[in-house]
Image: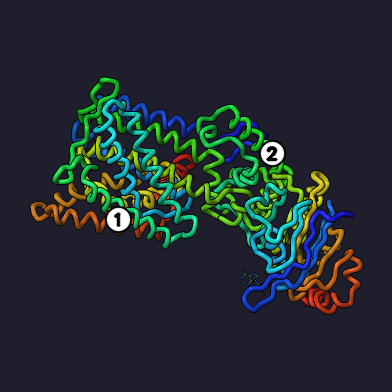
Amino acid sequence: MATTSSPVAPPLRRPSANRVGLVLLLVLAYGLVPLVGTSYLYEAILTPFLALSLAALGLNLLTGYAGQLSLGSSAFMALGAYAAFNLSLRLPVLPLPVTLVLAGLVSALAGLIAGLPALRLRGFYLAVSTLAVQFFVAWVLNRFGWLSNDSPSGVVSAPPLVIAGLSFEDARGRYLVSLTVVSLLTLFAWRLVASPTGRSFVAVRDNETAARVIGVEVARTKLLAFALSSFIVGIAGVLWAFAYLRTVEPAGFNLDRSFQILFIVIIGGLGTLRGAFLGAGLIVVLPLLLSRLGAALLGDGFDSGTLEMGQRIALGGLIVAFLIREPAGLVALLDRAVRRVRRPA
Amino acid sequence: MNAFLAVDAVSLGFGGAVALDSVDLSVAKGEIHAVIGPNGAGKSSLLNAISGLYRPDSGTIRIADDGFSRVPTKRLAELGVARTFQNLALFKGLSVLDTVMAGLVHRQSAGLAAQIFGLPAARREAREHRERAEAVIASLDLADVRDRLAGTLPYGVQKRVELARALVARPRLLLLDEPMAGMTATEKQRMSGYIRAARVSSGTTIVLIEHDIGVVMSLSDRVTVLDHGRRIASGTPAEVQADPAVLAAYLGLAFDEEAA
Ligand SMILES: Nc1ncnc2c1ncn2[C@@H]1O[C@H](COP(=O)(O)OP(=O)(O)O)[C@@H](O)[C@H]1O
Ligand SMILES: [Mg+2]
């Protein structure tokens, strides 16, 4: 929300610096990475990072900006993924981008319904009601076999990623598709939080009574937050299944995933868009770092069980540390570091 | 003169406790009307009833030409009513500029898509709203902090930001619940100046709760005194000050407190 009309110079605002950073990042992601990237980089790091970032971005709109806690993110990822799978199975004429948007809309509609309790409940009780969504969606996916094209195992392959006749099936192609979807939706989210609607989200979060008094339509604002958030999370689910896992299965979207996304938001920074990316980066890179570290320290004694446990302990420790020491997340740490570099004491 | 705000025999209880006992309040258009009384007298309850946050057990509230048994808070801003709260009710995660612009949310007509895709109508509206917010920010001397998060500002400044959020809508009726609580004498004088200016510039009718008798006497046209949920006096500052019931119930107490 930069303004130039005021005679007063806005203090501590460098939108131009941010914009330059963003352009550099995009040049890097589109220009450099595809030249030097390996399959391992795309498949183990970048594609899951992008899908999780997008899911966290969506959840952050709801929880970080509008203040409505949700523990059911992966249910909306699942809805998006299954909607996209069934659309591409049953309506193969639809181009992939259209399928993506429709899948997002299915998830958004479900989000709208899941948001209805938020008109009555808040905090802990609302979180529990979103948990119910998680279990309900898991039940539906198991109960109705046709959603998985009656596959006996419940696991189905994702359709190939083809856009306008071009195949994006290889690791790099799936990375590029993910990158493009994430970039566009991040732009969307960025416009949203800077808009009057985004302002109303924060108003409802910070003081519902005051928001109502100045004329914010509180119920509508909460439902909108649920719908828009679920739209983005649903599309993140499509990326997770189609571009990363290559399969569509309920196990990809269990409660652990919902918590993982919530942790990304908390570690990255509630109520910031960058936080979703920082948090997701940490969550994706952490296990890789730990396994390297573990192998170096323990040698052969370091097996996958130890790794799994080490990961959980490290993650738990990080969350507690952030909640106590830096509730504003990685974003706050980063901002402080940048300020220190810019103005050496 | 025809009253702009008329509270008629409003009663309100919480469980056994009586917060308002058949209270009347009549405020003429353009008047600055102070509501005073000891702590717990029911002053905030009265403003909460007028803004629809509390539902009176009985009585009616008329704002301009509309009478209500419960004022619809949703429509408050549309009705031209704005208010501040005794305990700050700011959006701590919004900048001062965004906070003040939020005060215009009820005038928002551009839809979500227009906002996100930056369509001309939304851009024009955003520019207009920003200009209005900037003007209010300048008139309340908040320009230095316009990009700061509201929650990070000193208490007195936050009080002013809250006033700015209310004033930006150019309300016809402004309800202020202890806008000068906890301020120094100098700050109170500045705040009085801003409140007077609001009436001059927009002809706003103002109901104001205030403890500082000096401020009340100099700022208000009329005064209503509450005690234990009942109106015990109403009139010009001079009349109220001379009223024996008021002296007994309130002013003596207040003067004692100030002397102590
Ligand atoms: N939300 C509430 N719940 C219960 N009691 C309340 C509530 N609001 C006000 N009261 C009671 O109503 C009485 C008047 O309170 P209030 O209007 O806040 O007084 P004042 O603003 O004059 O100090 C007090 O006894 C207070 O305890
Ligand atoms: Mg009070």
The answer to whether residue A332 is visible is no
Q: Amino acid at mark 2?
A: Arg
Q: CA distance from mark 2 to mark 1?
A: 49 Å
What is the secondary structure assignment of the residue under circle 1?
Answer: helix
Tell me whether the residue at label 2 lies in contact with that at label 1, contact meaning CB atoms closer than 8 angstroms: no
Residue for point 25% across, 29% down? A161
Pick whichever, B102 or A111, lies toward us. Answer: A111
Q: Relative to B12, does residue A232 appear above or below in the rendering?
A: above
Judging by the rendered image, the residue that carries numbered circle 2 is B132
Q: Nearer the viewer, residue A153 or B172?
A: A153
Q: Position of residue A317 (x, y in %)?
A: 30, 59
The quarter of the rendering in which ligand 1 is drawn is: bottom right
The answer to whether A287 appears left or right of B59 in the picture is left
Q: Which mark is residue B201?
A: none
Label 2 packing within 10 angstroms: few (<14), some (14-19), many (20+): some
Q: Mark 1 sits on what residue?
A: A135
> Residue B62 lies in what quarter of the image?
bottom right
The answer to whether residue A262 of the structure is visible from this angle is: yes
Please state the chain letter of the residue tagged with numbered disc 2 in the rendered image: B
Q: Is residue B146 above or below residue A305?
A: above
Q: Which residue is at the far top?
A: A165
Amino acid type, residue under disc 1 in the picture: Phe
